[in-house]
Image: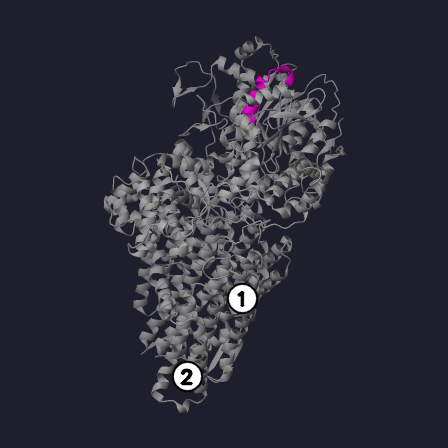
Amino acid sequence: MNWSLQFFIWIPLLGFLMSLLLKRTNEKALSYVAIGTVGLQLFLGITFVSIWLIKGQPGINLKDIVLYRNEDYEFLIDFYFDKITATYLIVGAVLSFMVILYSRYYLHREEGYKRFFNTILFFYAGFNITICSGNFETLFIGWEILGISSFLLIAFYRNRFLPVKNAIKVFSVYRLGDIGLLLTMWMSHHLWHENITFLKLNNYTLVHEHLAGHSYVGVFISIMILVAAAAKSAQLPFSSWLPRAMEGPTPSSAIFYGSLSVHIGAFLLLRTFPFWENQTIVRVIIVLLGLSTMIIATGIARVQSSVKSQIAYSSIGQIGIIFIEIALGFENLALFHFAGNAFLRTYQLLVSPSVVSYLIREQFYNYSPHEKSIESGFPLKLQNTLYILCIKEWNLDEYLYRLIWNPLKRAGRRLTILPPKAIYIFFVPCYLIGLYGLYHKELLNPTILVYLPVFFAFIALAMVLQSFAEKRNIMHTWLLILMSHFWTALAIGYNDIFSVTQIYIYLSGIIGSGVIGILIIRRMSQLEPNIDLSMFHGHVYEYPVKAFVFLIACLGLTGFPITPTFIGEDLLFSHMHQNQIVLAIIVSLCFVIDGLSIIRVFARVFFGPHIKTYHEVAYRSS
Amino acid sequence: MERTTSVFDERELLRELKHYLPAQAPLKDFIHHNSLHAFQEKPFFEALKSASDIFGYKTFLSLGEFRSLHQKGRINDHILNRILEDSVGKNLTESWKHKLTQESYDENIQPNIGLLRAFWKKKLGIDLESFVQPLLFRILCSYLDQGIAIWEFPLHKDGFLATIRQIEENSSSSFFKGKKAKELLFNENTSITLLLKLIVGEESYFEQYIFDQQFSHQGWSGMVSVVEDMPETLLVTKKISLREIIIFELLLEIDTLDDRFKGKWKPLCELVDNVPEALFNKRAQSELDTVLMLWQQAFEWSFYDQVLTGIQSEKVVNHTIEQKSFQAAFCIDDRECSLRRYIESFDLNAETYGTPGFFGVEFYFQPEGGKFTTKVCPGPITPKYLIKESGAGNRPKKDIHFSKHSHNFIFGWFLTQTIGFWSAFKLLINIFKPTMSPATASSLKHMDKNASLVIENKDLNHKEHNLQVGFTIEEMAVRVENVLKSIGLIGDFAPIIYIVGHGASSTNNPHYAAYDCGACSGRAGSVNARVFSFMANHKAVREILAGKEIHIPAKTQFVGAISDTTRDEIVFFDTENLIAENVVLHKKNSLVFEKALDYNAKERSRRFDSIDSKQSAQKIHQKILTRSVSLFEPRPELNHATNAMCIVGRRELSKGVFLDRRSFLNSYDYSIDPEGNYLLNILNAATPVCGGINLEYYFSRVDNQKLGAGTKLPHNVMGLFGVANGIDGDLRPGLPSQMIEVHDPVRLLMIVEHLPEVVLNTIKRNPATYEWYRNDWITLVVVHPETKEMYLFKNENFKPYSTVSQKPEMVSNIEKLVESHEENFPIFLIEQH
C-alpha cells in the first residue's frame, strides 16, 4: 500500500503532460483529460484513505527516488502520508474535481481554454507534490510549481496590463517566501547532517536531541518556516497579494486563491509542527501573527466594496485563526477549519456574480437607511483613522515596495557604474582568474581564501541586482543573470570541496537555458526592433511558441525543477557552513532576485498590452 | 497642428466631457444604447473615423475578417461590385477591388487620447496612473457602494468632496501622503483651474489633460457622470459630481508627485518637448478608412439585399379564417420572432402582433413590501403613475452564503466550519443538477403571480411618492386605443387576446438586467401585460373605445402573460376571470403555446454547444431549463445577438420569410394610418430602442475590449453597480464577449410598409428620430404596401431600390434546417400551408 502513495504524484503529472499534447481547439478532449485526471485522483484518494483509516492511520514514509548521491549528500524524492496529507488530498481533489467540471462549460469558447486546463493541472500536480512530500527538498519542488503556475493563472489574461502586473506582484511575494524555505533547508542540512524527512521530525527524542544546544538554530529554522508559510498564506505583512491574485477566470480564483493555494502556508506549519512544538517563543510568535492578521484582515474585509476582495480578506482572517489553532496544538480543529474555509470561499467566489441580483433584491425589500455598524461606537477620530487605514489596506501593498523592492532597485542602480560592455571586458577575465585560482588554491593566502567566497557571492549579488534595476537592455539583463550564476558557483567552489561534477550539475541547466534564452532574445530583437524593458510589449500575441520556449528557458535559469540545476542549488547550500549566515543570505537573495529579474524580462517582452494596435487592445486600467 | 489659446472654461469642459463619457447606468438599470452616442450628430462613417482617431476605438471588423467573409461567400461579390461602382465609379472598380481584397495596410490605430499625459512617464519616468488609480477607484467604489461593504463610507450630505474633507479633518491617518494636497483640499479657492495651473501649467493644455486623465478610466468617470445626472438610478442615492472626482484625482496626482520628487517637480507643460496632436484634430480620410467603409457596406448589403428580395418574393396564401382561435401581442423583441412563427404554424387560426413590450402603459411599479419603486417603461419617458402590488405570497428567500457575517472572524469561524461543508454539497448539486435558487434572477420574481394589482384610480388625490396611484378610466382608454390602433387590431377580435410581456432568467449573471425587456427599462414585462389586459377588459374602457369605432365583443377577453426568453416558459395571469367558454379555449391555446415554446427552445439550442439540437423538442426544452439555472453557464441565452433588422408593417409582409430570430417585428397597418400619426409613435419608440440595441451590439462586437466589457469570466462585482476585472480595475461598460461573439456587426435595417412620401414626412417630424436616419446610423427602406416596390432612404430622400440577390430558397422543414448547423442562416422562404 505504501508503495501506491506515489500515484498521487504521477497521476496529476501524467494528466498535465497529456493535456499539453492535445490540440488547442479540442475542448472536449482537454476537459475529459482534466476530469479523468482529477476524478481518478479523487477515487484513488478516497480508496487509499479508507484503507489507511482501517489500518489505523499509520504515518507512511516512502523513500522513492534518489536523484543524486555522494558520500555525504543525498538528494532524494521522499513521500509522506498522514492525516494532514489525507485531509489536504481529499479536500484538494474534491474541490478541483468540482471546479474542473464547472470550468468545462464556463470556459467554453474562451481564448486560452487549453492553457487554462494545462495550468490548472500543473498547479494540481504542484499541490499534490507539496502535500505528499516527505522532506523539504520534495516539498520545495511542489512549492516552486505552485509559484510558477500561480503566476501563469493570475496572468491568464496575459495581454492585459493589470493581470500581468499583479501576477508579477504575487510572484515576488512568493519568491520572498522562498528565501524562508531555502534558508530552512540550508540550516536543516547542518542541524541534521542529512536531508531530514518529515517522518523523523515526528520523532520527539530525535528532534529534542538535535536541538539541544542549538536552540538558536531551531528558532532560526522555525522563523524561516513561518516566513515561508506567512507569504504563501497571505498573512501579515504579505496579505495584500491575495485580493490582487483574483485576476484569472472566476473558477481558478475560487479554487486557488480562495482555497487550495492560500492554505498551503497552513499546511507547512502543520507539517513542521513537531519541530517547533517545544519552542514556546515560536508558538507565541505564530499566535501573535495569526491574531494580528485576523484583526487587521477582518477590518479590511469590512470596508471592501468589491465582492472578490471582500471574500479574499475574510479568508485571510480565517487563515489567521487557523494559524492560531495550529500554534495552540489543535491540529484536528485546524484541519477541519481548513476544509470548511476552503469549501466556503470556493463556493462564495463561484457564486459571486450572483451577488448583484441577490443583494439588490434583498435591498429592495429590506433597505433601511441608517443601519449602524459596530464601528459607530468608536470615537469619531478613531473611526475615521481606522476607516482610512482599512481602505488603504494599512499600506501593506506600498510598504513591500518601500521597504524591499525599491531599496533593492536603488542598490542595483548604484551598482551600475560600468557600461554593459565594460562589465564583460572587466568581469570575464576576472572570472577566469578566479577560476584559475580555484584549481590552484595553494597559491592563495589562507586569510584571503576565507573571504573570497563572500566576495564572489557579493559580485554575483551585484550583478543580479543590476539586472533587476536595468531599465532597457534585455540581452544585457539576461547576461548579467547568467554571469551571476557563474559567480555564485565560483563562490561556493572556494568555500568547500566542491567537485567538478557538482559544478557541472549546477551549471548544466544554467548554460542550456541561458543559451536558449540568448537565441530567443536575439531572434526577437531581429523581428521586433524596439523591444526593451521600459514597458510591456505583449509579443505573445504574435509569437506564442517563442514565448513558450522562452518561458522554459526562464524556468531553467531560475533553477526550476526541470533541469539538474535544481539539485545543484540544493547542493550549493549544503556546502555553506552553519556559521556562514552572510554567505547564505547573499546567495539566497541572489536566487530570489534572479527569479524576479527573469520573470520581469519574460513578462516585459511577451506579456502585457500588445504594442501593436491593429486588433482589439484593452485599456491599461482594465 | 495648431493650438488655439482660448480661455479655459471649466463648465464647458465638464459639459463636453460628459458628452463623450460612457453613459451606461448601474447594472440593475442596464439599458442598451448606442455606445458612440456622443458622435451621433455626425454621419455614421465620419463618426466612426472621429471616434477612432480621438479615442482609439476599433470601429470595424478587421480587414482580415472582411476578406474571410468574402471568401466564404457571406459577402456577396455582386453586391461588392455594385457598391464599388456606386462609390468609386466603374473605371476604378477593378483597382479598388484589388485594394479591398489584396493590398496590405497598416491597421494599427494611433489615437490622440493619452498623448499629452504620456509625458509624465516619458520625461520623469513616473507611472502616475499606477499610484493614483487603485486608491481613487477604491475610494469611489466605497463611496458609491450599494451594499457590499459592511462598514460603510461615513457620508456627508454635501457630496463627495465634503465627505472626504469631513473624514480627513478628524483623523490621524490620511488618504494623502503629504501636506500640500491636503491643504489644497481644504482651501476654499481650490478649483479644477487652480489645480491644473499647478500640475499642467499652460492653459492651452488644460482640456486635453483632463480628457487624457478621465479617459484613462472612462468606466469610473462615466459611472460618476451618470449618477450625477440621475441619482435615482442608485437605490441608495449618493451625491457626487464629475467635477468633484476630477479635483480629487488632481489632488492625488499632486500628492504623488510631491511624494515621489520631494516637492520638486515642474508642471507638465515644461516637460512637453514636441507638441502632441490636439485631441479633436480632424485627420484626413486614409485609403484604409475608405477600404473598410466599402467592406462594411458590402457586408451589410449582402444581408439587406437578401432580406428585401425575400420580402419581395414571399407570397402569403390568404386563406380566410372562419373562427380565429386567439390573437397574441408580443414585444417587438427579436427573440420573440421565432416564437411567433411557431405559434402561427401550429395553429393556423391564430394571429400574432408585435408592439413595444410595455404595451403603451407607462408607470412605476412597487411590489408589496418593496422599499422603492421601479420604472417599467422606455427610458426617456418619465411616468406619472404608480402601480402597486398587494397580497403577494412569495418573497425572496435568503441564502446564508451571501451573508455578510461570514466576513467577520467570530461568525466567520463558526460559519466556515458549518456552512462551509454545506457549500461543497450545494456546489456538487448545482454542478450535477442545477436548480432555481435565491440567487437566480428570474422573470417571475418581478411580480407575484397571485398578488393583485391596484390599477384603477378612483380618486385623483390618491398619490404616493408624488405619483398618481393607478389610471383613470379615460387614461386607460387612451392607452388601449393607441396600442390597438398602432398594431392595426381594430376589428375581427378573437375570443382571447393574449398580451405577452417577456423577461429572462439567469444565474450568476451581473448583466441580468440586459436580458429583460428593454421597453420596460430592463425589467420583465409582466406587470405591464397584466395592467394592459385589465384596462382592455374594463367595461367602461370598452364603452369609450366603442365610441371610437373599436367594438370589442363582450366575449373577447384579454389575458396578460409573461414569457421567459431564457427558459421558454409562459405564465398566464388572472385566468380565473375567464368566462367558461374561454376557459376551454384557453386550455387548447395553452397547448399551442407549450408546443411552440418547445420548438422555440429547439431552434435556440442550435447555437448552444452543450445541447445536441438533433434531439426531440421536448428533451431539448428540458435541457434549456437546466441551462438557465446553471451557475457555470455564462450564456444562459444569447439575448439580442445577431439582431439586424426591424420590420414595421403587417404580419403578411414577412410571415413567409425565415428571419432566423434576427428581426424586431412591430405590427402596423398603413391603411388605418394614412397620415403616419401612429407610425410616428412607433418610430419614435422603435428607432432609439432597436437602434440602441443594434449599435451596442455592433460596437461591443468590433471592439470588445474598449467598447465592450471583455470576457465576463474574470469579472468582479463592484459595489453592486458595475463590473471590473480583478479588484483594482476600471469599470467595464458595454457587453461582455459571451453576449456578442456570434453577432454580425451590421447596422439596423428598418423596413417600413407605407408610402415613401408619408414615411419621409413622418420621420422629419421628430428631429431626434430623424437624426438616426439622416446620419445613416440606421438604414431605412420603405416597402410600398401594394406594389412591394422598395425605396431606400439616402441623402434625405427616398430613391427606388432594386434587389440583385437571387430569390431565396424555399424551406419546408424548419426542424431539419435548425438541426443543420450553428452559424447564421441566409434568408429563406417558408413554405406556406
Disc 1 versus disc 2: distance between alpha carbons? 33 Å
Q: Mark 1 lies on which chain?
A: A
* Residue linked to disc 2: A494
Q: Which chain carries label 2?
A: A
Is residue A389 shown above or below B323?
below
Q: As shown in the figure, which amino acid type bears the numbered disc 2?
A: Tyr
Q: Residue at x 52, y 11 (%)?
A: B540
- Is most of the magenta stretch helix, strand or loop? helix
Q: Can residue A203 be seen in this view?
A: no
Q: Is B718 inside the magenta-drawn segment?
A: no
Judging depth in this view, the residue of B422 and B623 nearest the camera is B623
Relative to B399, B76 lies left or right: right
| Image position, residue B312 (x, y; %) | 72, 27
Is residue A593 shown above or below B399?
below
Tell us which disc is closer to us: 1 or 2: 1
Q: As shown in the figure, which amino acid type bears the numbered disc 1?
A: Ile
Judging depth in this view, the residue of B20 and B287 nearest the camera is B287
| Image position, residue B181 (x, y; %) | 28, 47
Q: Which residue is drawn at 67% across and 35% down?
A: B86
| Image position, residue A93 (x, y; %) | 53, 58
Q: What stretch is highlighted in magenta?
A: B670-686
Relative to A184, B549 lies left or right: right
| Image position, residue B565 (x, y; %) | 59, 34
* Residue linked to disc 1: A521
Q: Do the residues labelled 1 and 2 touch (CB within 8 Å)?
A: no
Q: Is B683 inside the magenta-drawn segment?
A: yes
